[in-house]
Amino acid sequence: MRRFEGKGAMNLNRFVLGAIACAGFAATSAFAELPVEPTPASRTLPAEYPDSFVFLVDGNFWGIESGKVVIADVGHEWDHHRGAVGSAQFGYFAAAKTRPELYVVETFYDRGHRGKRTDVITIYDKATLNPTGEIVLPGGKRAQTLTEQGAFQLSSDERYAYVFNFTPASSVTVVDLEKRKIVGDVDIPGCVHAFALKGGGFASLCGNGGVVSTKLDENGKQVGQTMSAPFNDIDNEPMFTRPAIIGGVGYFPTYHGKIQEIDFNGDEAVVGESWPIVLPDAAEGGKRLFGLMKAKKPEHRLPSGWQLISSDDAGRIYLLMRATETIDDHDTGGDEVWVIDPKSRNVIDRIKLRGDSQLIEVTAGEDPYLVALNMDMSLDVLKASNGEFVRRIGGQMVMSPFAIVGNK
């Protein structure tokens, strides 16, 4: 602090020092009146999450042993980050609807990034996000890939969980979530994933272009397996393996712009029709699309992205599309979302995003949000009904998410 010389200056110095002392005393007195906050202090979440909650499965490419699942409220004006649970080494995630539990399939090494490997299903309480148990998966063989929808699913009654393994032999581990124990493994040679069948068991997509259905008994034991005829021309019409599932029917987009239906409502998968995604022709009386500028020559667009398809509670499909002439950029992402009515098979809307996105999700509810991941890892939230921009959520809430899972 600067000092002043002379008698007058001496008095000024005393005044200044006295003022500082008084201010310090006043500040100390004010702070002393604040109540002592108990530690640890953490809030809890509601037992039933609102429709606006989404789960951001963040693999964290810069430190995959420290991945996480962030619970975010995209409907709130400012309170977006509501909590998080761990998800180590390319973890998979699922949320129960009949129990207040969250499940993460993850992998640990006893030396961090090396050493003895242990695969587990960690069980978290939905309200506190505290771990309440874990189920050790045998063999260190669960698939470690970017998040795949069919790599970890719950059975239709949520008693069992299906975990996809790849060593590179492929199999599915069946886990009893009620008894919290392993039931056994089911071999699915040449096939991948485990989409839950309503009649019990699961279906897997196969390299021959067919789908195999595995039937399980009431104890989760395999009692049968049936293979469909080949329907997917993998060489000429490859199919994305991440569908939108509406009413038990999976809608799988293809690289060349079709939708392939597979019905999971029975005890075996039933392959349905494959139909093209076609814009209505305005010149021939086609329906006007909201937010679409009429063009003399429409762009050629194809499905593109990692999590490129979703659905709302009304049964509409939302598909991420890219302006392209080639299928070689099928995972690049796009800047438009096409809304499709699967009953009429018509495109009923085109939503223009503010930039390219690789992941989209639609929340639950009568007035849902469309959530799109931007290239800078921020989230854009739009009204799914008309594409109106609502808000951007940034702040590095996630580092490198592989999936956005709606609370539905």
Image (cartoon, rainbow, N blue to C red):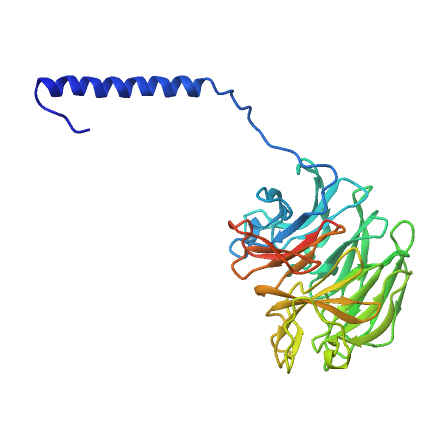
Q: Is residue 119 visible?
A: no
What is the x, y in percent for residue 167? 69, 63
Q: Is residue 240 visible?
A: yes
Between 301 and 232, which is closer to the camera in this rendering? 301
- Assign the N terminus to one quadrant of the image: top left
Between 245 and 353, which is closer to the camera in this rendering? 353
Above-or-below relation of 219 to 261: above
Q: Measuring 83% from the left and 52% from the top, which residue is drawn there?
A: 155
Above-or-below relation of 307 to 208: above
Q: Measuring 51% from the left and 55% from the top, which residue is drawn there?
A: 62
Q: Quadrant of residue 287?
A: bottom right
What is the x, y in percent for residue 254? 73, 74
* Total tally of numbered discs in the picture: 0
Single out the residue that lies furthest toward the left: 6
Q: Measuring 80% from the left and 57% from the top, which residue is drawn there?
A: 314
Q: Quadrant of residue 84?
A: top right
What is the x, y in percent for residue 47? 73, 37
Q: Measuring 51% from the left and 50% from the top, which residue is drawn there?
A: 396
Between 20 and 156, which is closer to the camera in this rendering? 20
Would you say 273 lies left or right of 300 here? right
What is the x, y in percent for residue 175? 79, 49
